[in-house]
Amino acid sequence: MAKAVKRSELKGVFLPNRPKVQGGMVDLLLDVAEREPDRPHFRWPDGRMMTVGELADRSRRWATVLAAEGVERGDRVALVGGNSEDYVATQFGTYMLGAVEVPVNAELRGSLLARGLSDPDPKVIIIDEDLYESVSPHVPEGVKVLVRDGDTDARVAAAEPIADPVRPAISDLAFILYTSGTTGPSKGVMLPHGYLLNTAATWTAAMGTKKGDGMYFPAPFFHVDAHVVNTMCLMTGATLGIAKRFSVSRFWEESYAVGATLFLAVGSMASALVARKPEQPPEHAFRLGIVAPIMPEVYDYFEDELGIPLLQLYGQTEADGVVFCTLDKRKRGSAGWACCGFDVRIVDEHDEPVPVGEVGRLLYRPHEAHMMTMGYWRRPDATAESTRNLWWHTGDLARVDEDGFLFFEGRASDSIRRRGENISAWELEAALRDIDGVQAAAAIPVRDEIGGEDEVKVFIVLEEGFEWDAERFFAACQEQLPRFAQPRFVELVTEDDLVRGPGTGAIQKHLLPRENTDKTIDRMEVFG
């Protein structure tokens, strides 16, 4: 009798030290503030600090200001700003009205920004003063705007803290975060209050986070990871070190100044730290780092030279922690094992599990409610497509080895990941077509040897008779696109060079060359 083939299916478990989840996000903040109002929560490299009590008070004052602007339960409040304690206070002030937060990527430009501000249909948009000039032209007509400046700060400080804040249930919608589209525009991922609490509980268990720990977080606060680590710190008593933005030159000094024992970085950040490592081992207090993806040289430097263990995970905005490495069970290069309460399958095009070791499509489903997205904002079609056959379809490729570890193998969907950001190829191509002289565009990912993620390569068909100017094209990209979405490589092609699918007319991107040739124009060479 032939031996049965072992299939790629992982049964999820919960780590035994995972905190119990109860209540909602407002419950968490107010309950901690009542018990430990003087507990440090935020720390800055210059020594400043904010307590949980001060955060709760500031959040309640923001709730009063937002209520005066007409914000009610279910309304959306869009936030466009940099990393600050007040960014978090506006999040909680929104929650305290039963309203829904919409974090907006502060680097978006042009049509991408316009859609990000209009699609969620916000009642109010809060914009940092230094971003107002670039953002305000894209604010939908009739939407109220609050500029986070000195006048607004004084108004919030003078407001009476809301007396009876709403305490949303774990099943209530907390925030809508836009993530990369694949065959269309970016979709708004709807995330309930329980998502943050459940994900933070999983991260707490995997990392062993405890009171006295400090988390250094140099990524933007609009990211889902920022929401999770802030919740984790509230849940455990750890502090959150605020960095305005990631900086290779400041990373070690800042993280040490805020007393960080933990850090989180995307793969390109860690690779940049390795590429510019100091001559002498840096002073640090790290006991653990979370990085994804992790390149071999990053393991070599952080683990072998500095003695800092690194953990990797697989997650999406839709579920930020499906598998996780743990200190007692990890494998270099793996995204982790099924310790997060999600069952995982690697399947073929018919949703049938593939043999262990074979690359296939990654599916998952949770063991409990409110551990992942509620679906896509006003996109029941996309929600139904992703949840078919009772499994969440990620659009990603992966494999599982004999030991039950998952390895990420790229994206089956038409999406590009660069510098820790997901880029909708559909939206990028639409923005490129708005540039003078561009008739058609196709964007694909090519390997970034430094960060282990993607670089952006685009194929451009010019309008007939248009004179190409590389410097002018790249300058237009800088003006119209966020930094992470700006193409690194460009090739000029004709319509005859493209193969289009029958019926849809979609460009068959798998036939486009990934390798650069003498026809490839490198932005780095154009601008030196």
Image (cartoon, rainbow, N blue to C red):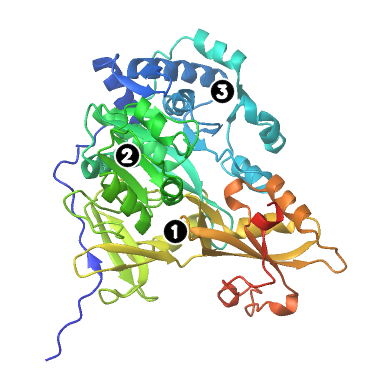
Dot 1 falls on a residue whose secondary structure is loop
Residue at far bottom of view: 1
Amino acid carrying label 3: it is Gly
Badge nearest the viewer, 3 or 2: 2
- CB under 8 Å between discs 3 and 2: no
Relative to residue 528, is residue 388 drawn left or right? Answer: left
Q: Is residue 412 above or below residue 56?
A: below
Q: Residue 15's spot in the image, x, y percent?
A: 17, 47
Closer mark to the observer between disc 1 and disc 3: 1
Q: Residue 306 is drawn in which quadrant?
A: top left
Q: Is residue 54 above or below residue 398?
A: above
Residue under pointer 1: 452
Q: Which numbered disc flags the more N-terminal residue, 1 or 3?
A: 3
Q: CA distance from mark 3 to mark 2?
A: 26 Å
Which residue is identified by label 3?
70
Q: Residue at x 26, y 56 (%)?
A: 336
Q: So how many labels did they put on this image?
A: 3
Q: Give the vertical position of 363 relative to 122 (above or below).
A: below
Q: Could you tell me if residue 294 is visible in this image? A: no
For disc 1, the neighbor class at 10 Å (few under 14, some 14 to 19, many from 20) is some
Q: Nearer the viewer, residue 262 or 439?
A: 262
Mark 3 or mark 2, earlier in chain: 3
Task: Check disc 2 and report the residue beneath it.
Answer: 194
